[in-house]
Image: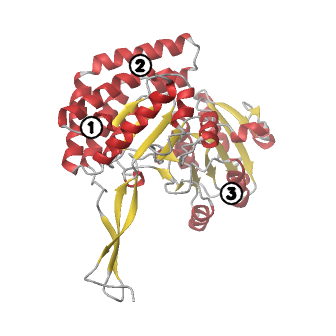
Amino acid sequence: MSLRETIHQIATRARNAGERLSELSTREKDAWLLRAVERLDAARDRVRAENRRDLDAATEKGVAEPLVRRLELSDGKWNDMLAGLRDVAALPDPVGRVEDLRVRPNGLRVGRMRIPLGAIGIIYESRPNVTVDAAALCVKAGNSVILRGGSEAIHSNLALAFELRAAAADVGIPEDAVQVVETTDRAAIEHLLRESENIDLIIPRGGPGLIRMVTENSHIPVIKHDAGVCHVYIDASADPEMAKRIAIDSKLRQMAVCNGLETLLVHRNAAQSVMPGVLKLLHEEGVELRGDETVTRLFGNVVPASEADWTEEYLGPVLAVRVVDDLDAAVAHIRRYGSDHTEVIVTESYSNAQEFLRRVNSATVGVNCSTAFSDGYRLGLGAEIGISTSKLHAFGPMGLEELTTRKFVLYGEGQLRE
């Protein structure tokens, strides 16, 4: 069987499974989630042995250490993954919920009912825990899912998917609700993107190259989960200690993530009073600082920034730093160089905070908090499929509701259009 035929069969099975899933009760879907927890817990050693194969291969290829860490199913990630399954099981099921019910003048009641999207293809890199998170959310929202992870995590993804599919069989829901593309041949992605008759949505998660390839070649609607060029802007009125804590947590908590800080903007009036303390702490923690002329003059341990640094998602111990004249300049910088992901202002000015929230239209915009809160779990979604940087249908962390759409439902008593 050719690769094209193989992908077509996978897509067809996903379509058929999705039709069955859309009719499942919440109890049936939650039973699968909890059975998946049991199976994964019992298979922990086997799955992590497969994960070790991926880690060893990445190390042999010379993959950068921060990216290798993204592959690892550490104790913390493993426990979070299982906790995420339980959390999704505990979340309210959006499918079938009627919203915005209103009565027309003729007595006809009009509402909107949440329904699954159908069959979803997810194309992603690294992070094998995405396999479990994505499957959990898609199935709970009544969708089947086709998972095409990166070649660097193929053994981990297959091992995880085996347990998810076995859990489905155990509780009597279609195994094809969750499928993993088993080949690492990149041509499989091209075939997947042509299955518009069977697949309803494509979600790419990864670097700019992957996102560009998917959006340029897909015959299916795409919701991008693009780069996270995230900013923290330290306003003139910012509390110095708060600014330090927020910058440190945003950058150092976990660097190889899309919600990590990549560019620090500092108001000119805070450049001498606040910035040196922030940069000193970051430098001491091993972060390479790349700054504009003012930053390099005020703080010695800085590499002059190039134009490319302002658009770079480093995913590692590098930070771009720029001094700006005012809030207008900070907003202009974010609009020009940002990726519509996450931006935060540190300020004691209520009016500046409100203006920043109003004018900056990234997926998540915050005041006096870490960029790390741009996360489905932290925002109360239970888990997330990823963080959408597309503005149509879903924008920001995508949870259960974002994996559904709505149809109009009409309740009448014999009304006719006259």
Relative placement, left or right, of 61 versus 103 is right
| Residue 3 screen position, x and y as percent | 50, 25
Q: Which residue is mark 3?
A: 331
What is the C-alpha distance between the residues marked 3 and 2? 43 Å
Between 276 and 413, the one lying in front of the other is 413
Occupied quadrant, residue 16: top left
Give the SS element for disc 2.
helix
Residue 55 to residue 286: above or below: above
Which one is closest to the eye, mark 3 or mark 2?
A: 2
Relative placement, left or right, of 362 versus 297 is left
In this view of the protein, can residue 366 be seen by the observer?
A: yes
| Residue 202 screen position, x and y as percent | 50, 43
Residue at the image position 47 percent from the left and 38 percent from the top: 122
Q: Residues within 10 Å of mark 1 (few under 14, many from 20)?
A: many
Relative placement, left or right, of 375 versus 250 is left
Residue 158 to residue 277: above or below: above
Which one is closest to the eye, mark 1 or mark 2?
A: 1
Which one is closest to the eye, mark 1 or mark 3?
A: 1
Tell me the kind of residue under disc 3: Val
What is the C-alpha distance between the residues marked 1 and 3? 49 Å
Q: Which residue is mark 1?
A: 174
Q: Residues within 10 Å of mark 3 (few under 14, many from 20)?
A: many
